[in-house]
Amino acid sequence: MPEENEDPTKLLKLVELAQKKASYFKDLESRAFAKIKFTDHYELYPLRSVSFENWLSSINYLNFIEVPPSKLKSDALLHLEGITRLYGKTHEAGLRVMGNEEFIEIDLGGPDWRSVYITKDGWKVGKHKNYFYRSRAMQSLPIPSKEKITKDWTQTNLNIQGDQQSMLIMGWLIGCFMPLGPNPLLVIQGEQGSGKSLLASMIRSLVDPAKADKTSLPSSERDLYVQAQNNYVLSFDNQRTLYKKHSDWLCRMATGGGYSTRRLYTNTEEEVFSMIRPIILNGITQVAEQPDLIDRSIFINMPVINPQERRSEREIFGSLDKLKPKIFGKICDSLVSILGKDDKENDNLPRMADFAKFVSRAEEVLEWENGSFIDAMNKNRQEELEELNEYDPLLNSIMALSRKNKRYAKIFLGTPAEAVQQAHGIYAGEILKVQLLRFTCNNI
């Protein structure tokens, strides 16, 4: 028998109190939210969250001097959720970033619930203009500063080498705040001791700081989308191998594909997830091996840190923390410039063209040459595809056979192992068979 409340009036009193203390609405996916007035600001809680349950407990105790049992809170939540879904107004609710072609608003994540509101005329910090919800793991961004910063901060603070890689990181950071359109993955590669995980943490802290700033890749696509509902940036640490299904998940998340499954505890109800999130992936060299994932990624190759130049994490983060307000201010200035300009004409757009065109509008304020960001993206992907081909034993064998027999019209009808043997010799072939087997297994 289901448990019943001993006193139904307690439920009615708690529901009436909750309705008096907050206003309620539903988002575009019919999720119910409460907008709660505090002393000097409003806070937004999903009804199905620990934060809202804690708030119900607090108002019940403050008004009735009684800690409500779990059953009472659960019944009150269901009652409020039902009313909101039937009669509540509909508003778009976002996590960390909201906007369109005319404005971008970034939730700072602080206890005062303020945001940065950006238009083509400038940016300012103030109370939320749109509806933002937060996860319990979210941490705050700094207040952006109008003070200028040297343009080589990525090389001096992030162990990045080369202007192209610095440009790609800055472009990716700006693109994270693009409210509409796809976001390429940022793939950080390097040998052990190159600082890949530390770099991933530092970059995420500039966009979406969180308590758990890196996690492992979830075991199911459903868990990936649940994680994306609670994190604006997803960062997956120490990935050694990505199977094809993992690449497909990440591609859909980068470009906005959806995922549907049966709703839990139902027979016919469907639950649909659809969202785009910036993703950081780090691991040993050649993390991404699928061409479609490479087309949707920006690659940062990290050199091994010289032991004499190695610094403690406390020192590195301390140095970065001093620069964060200036870096964030530079990003906000770039977004102002982007909102005030039209797309540039370019005949050589890469995959993720919307992202590339968005960032390219800020080239002038960033003091980059016209068209340089798109050129950097194209060169970055071409280099990665060429490096991938170098590690493909079958493709290398086919190319070697072609070079050996370029003067002849020859058709090879042997097996892949025989192609390796003929191209490289019997001894090299025996070694490459193992590589070929590994390559084949990773791409099943």
Image (cartoon, rainbow, N blue to C red):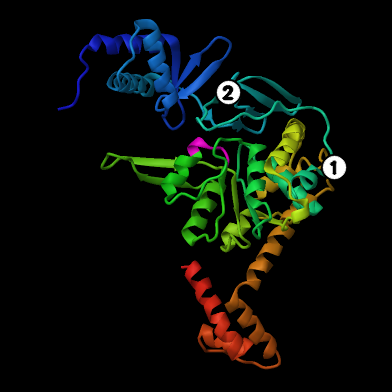
Q: Nearer the viewer, residue 100 or 379?
A: 379
Q: Which mark is residue 263?
A: none
Q: Quadrant of residue 276?
A: top right
Residue 231 locus on image (x, y percent): 53, 37
Q: Can residue 111 be seen?
A: yes
Q: Main secondary structure of the magenta part?
A: loop
Give the residue furthest to the left: 1
Q: Quadrant of residue 194?
A: bottom right
Q: Can residue 177 be seen?
A: no
Residue 20 locus on image (x, y percent): 41, 8
User: Would you name the residue on which mark 1 appears?
Assistant: 367
Amino acid under label 1? Glu
Q: Is residue 168 left or right of residue 150?
A: left
Q: Is residue 186 left or right of residue 123?
A: left
Distance from Cα at disc 1 to Cα at disc 2: 32 Å
Could you say whether the residue bearing mark 2 is in a helix, strand or loop?
A: loop
Contact (Cβ within 8 Å) of mark 1 with mark 2: no
How many other residues sit within 10 Å of disc 2, few (<14), some (14-19) or many (≥20)?
A: some
Q: Residue at x 56, y 54 (%)?
A: 238
Is residue 357 placed above or below 328 in the rendered structure? below
Q: Nearer the viewer, residue 112 or 333?
A: 112
Could you say whether the residue bearing mark 1 is in a helix, strand or loop?
A: loop
Q: Residue at x 46, y 43 (%)?
A: 225
Q: Residue at x 50, y 22 (%)?
A: 44
Is residue 378 placed above or below 429 in the rendered structure? above
| Magenta region | 229-233
Q: Residue at x 73, y 37 (%)?
A: 320
Q: Quadrant of residue 412?
A: bottom right
User: Would you name the residue on which mark 2 appears?
Assistant: 130
Q: Is residue 320 left or right of residue 396?
A: right
